[in-house]
Amino acid sequence: MKLGIIISSNDAEACWNAIRYANFALGQKDDVKIFFMGKGVEYQKIGTDKFNIVEQAEKFMQAGGKICACGTCIKSRGQ
């Protein structure tokens, strides 16, 4: 199955769960891509010890997942 996940929230728990779901789907041999837009492009800054978003994103990319982001959203937030 092909799966696209759009993350537009900067809520740590919501982002963490979305990326965990993406990792699960990759483990099921699905083709998964994540697209960050809006507040979602802040994912690297909002992680906590409980919701380690960067760790989940790295695991996702190492497993062959693709991450994209809105360039305008990144620029507008000084990322």
Image (cartoon, rainbow, N blue to C red):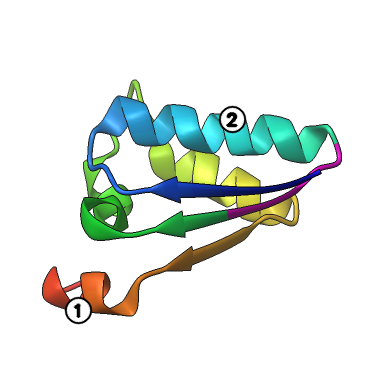
Tell me: residue 11, above or below residue 37: above
Main secondary structure of the magenta stretch: strand
For image coordinates 68% across by 55% down, the residue present is 65
Instruction: Provide the residue designation for mark 1.
Output: 75
Front-most of 37 and 15? 37
Residue 78 in which image quadrant: bottom left
Q: Is residue 76 magenta?
A: no
- Give the number of the disc on residue 29: none
Which range is magenta? 29-33
For disc 2, the marked residue is 21
User: Left or right of 79: which side holds 58?
Assistant: right
Residue 32 in the magenta stretch? The answer is: yes
**Residue 49 drawn at (x, y percent):** 32, 26
**Label 2 to label 1: alpha-carbon separation:** 27 Å
Query: In this view, which residue lies farthest toward the right?
Result: 29
Q: Amino acid at mark 1?
A: Lys
The residue positioned 75% from the left and 56% from the top of the image is: 64
Above or below 63: residue 25: above
Element type at mark 1: helix
Left or right of 24? Residue 37 is: left
Q: Which residue lies at the image location 65% right of the left edge and 36% below the top edge?
A: 23
Residue 24: x and y, percent? 69, 30
Say which element carries label 2: helix
